[in-house]
Image (cartoon, rainbow, N blue to C red):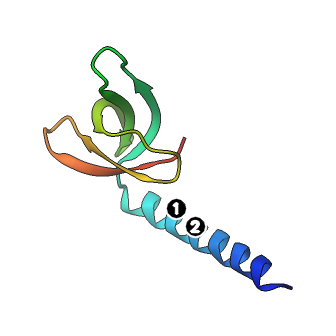
């Protein structure tokens, strides 16, 4: 096994572990993104504790990254993009 294959396997293992911890800790998770072009604002569908909310986000991000979103309680919080 080459170092490259070993690195990919290790990263896959860490990703799986990290995703498991996220689900267990019930962090907010972004499940989809809708960009509103009129204002340039981004809207994200965020799942939190089994409920889905349409929230405003800061910036545009690719999958597997973390985005800051304003949750319904008015607080900015980090959410994990999984779409």
Q: Is residue 12 above or below residue 67?
A: below
Residue furthest out toward the right: 1
Identify residue for label 1. Answer: 19
Front-most of residues 24 and 14: 14
Going by the image, does 1 lie left or right of 28?
Answer: right
Q: Are marks 1 and 2 in contact (CB under 8 Å)?
A: yes
Going by the image, does 83 lie left or right of 68?
Answer: right
Q: How many numbered discs, if any? A: 2
Q: Position of residue 26 (x, y in %)?
A: 37, 55
Q: Position of residue 2 (x, y in %)?
A: 83, 84
Question: Which element is circle 2 on?
Answer: helix
Residue at 71% from the left image edge and 73% from the top image edge: 8
Q: Residues within 10 Å of mark 1 (few under 14, many from 20)?
A: some
Q: Is residue 74 above or below residue 63?
A: above
Question: Which element is circle 1 on?
Answer: helix
**Location of the N terminus (image quadrant):** bottom right
Identify residue for label 2. Answer: 15
Front-most of residues 50 and 79: 79
Q: Is residue 56 above or below residue 20?
A: above
Residue at 34% from the left image edge and 28% from the top image edge: 43
């Amino acid at each position: 096994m080459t170092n490259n294959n070993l690195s990919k396997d290790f990263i896959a293992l860490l990703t799986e572990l990290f995703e498991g911890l996220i689900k267990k800790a019930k962090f907010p998770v972004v499940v989809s993104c809708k960009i509103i072009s009129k204002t340039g604002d981004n809207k994200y569908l965020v799942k939190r504790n089994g409920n889905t909310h349409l929230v405003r986000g800061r910036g545009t991000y690719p999958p597997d990254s973390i985005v800051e979103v304003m949750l319904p309680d008015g607080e900015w919080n980090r959410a994990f993009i999984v779409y």
